[in-house]
Amino acid sequence: MDVVVFGAGSLGSLLGGLLARAHDVTLVGRHRHVERVRREGLRVTGAVEATVFPDARTDAPASADLALVTVKAYDTAAAASALADTDLDATLSLQNGLGNERRLAEALDAPALAGTCTYGARLVGPGEVACTGVGEVVLGAREGGASTLADRVGAAFTEADVATTVADDMPRRLWEKLAVNAGINAPTALARIQNGSLLDGDVADLTRTAACEVAAAARADGVDLTDDAAVNAVERVARATADNRSSMLQDVEKARRTEVDSINGVVSGPDAPVNRTLTALLRAWERERGLRE
Ligand code: KPL
């Protein structure tokens, strides 16, 4: 399969590197990283070790079977317009937040699959990405149900030894992932702590409540996500990624805009005071640093 990874940051580079073991991969990313990959290949270190030689560039190629979109949620519209002239059979969003695949489907002339990913990744520097935890990619039709396209993409990922499940309940899984990110990302970013530190102490309640508020919003949207399921999911992921620094903590440490709008901000109404507070605090931090209006 011919795969273009649009957004060769940490997760995009890791997945691109893993997929390049079995497929033709093009990484689209920033100049310095792309230049190094072109000259010396991409080194995957940590829990998986490999050196691969994908194509690498700063703009979208003319065609690909699949565009794997891994940009930050707030860059999805820009990614879609950059891919507008690429001849594609399908896109797969592996991003935080809700609605990314809908945005891709609306903007591009190719079906969009939805997905979640629990692999841990850290961009060590140009040309090197560390796998900080072997997780799983789950992908499927964005509105749920069976999909031969999802089966085909899932088989291609499996062929490259990327642990992958094809699921027929993506809407529920995306809401559950939102509950996990709502409970982990903002608290770790604000308190500057690793994911595992959320499991005990005062902040554990905050994490659980943020996840339950997301579960309530999911139910209001017709998705069957119980509070228990949301709490179990957030605790399971915090335990499995205990030593990781969440993507939002990494953003804050690098003084970059966060994805709070697409995570806690999705459920920041009057019935969700914890998510509203977390959103307000991170937005204030971004505003003070000139990262948002
Ligand atoms: O997706 C993540 C993120 O950091 O964005 C989790 C699952 C919380 C792992 O750190």
Image: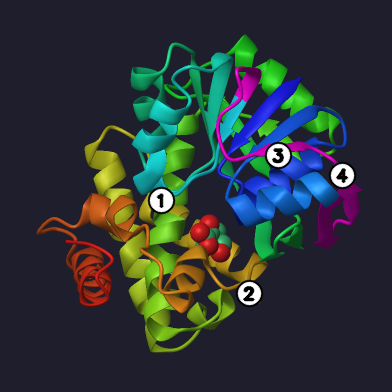
Query: Is residue 43 in the magenta section?
Result: yes
Residue at x 14% of width, y 58% of height? 271
Q: Which residues are magenta?
A: 40-66
The residue nearer to you, when weighing 196 against 156, is 156
Residue holding disc 4: 52
* Separation (CA) of disc 4 from disc 3: 11 Å
Q: Which one is closest to the eye, mark 1 or mark 3?
A: 3
| Callout 1 crowding tier (Cα within 10 Å): few <14, some 14–19, many ≥20 | many
Could you tell me residue 211's position as x and y percent? 37, 60
C-beta proximity under 8 Å, tags 2 and 4:
no
Q: Estimate the x, y position of residue 15 in percent, counting from the top left.
A: 71, 44
Q: CA distance from mark 2 to mark 4?
A: 29 Å
Relative height, residue 66 to residue 244 (above, below): above
Residue 162 point in image, percent of width and height: 78, 40
CA separation, marks 3 and 2? 32 Å
| Residue 97 visible in rendering | no
Circle 1 residue: 178
**Residue lying at 89% horizontally and 50% vertically, measured from the top left:** 51
Q: Hey, which quadrant is residue 122 in on the image?
A: bottom right
Which label is found at residue 56? 3
Contact between labelled residues 2 and 3, with CB atoms less than 8 Å apart: no
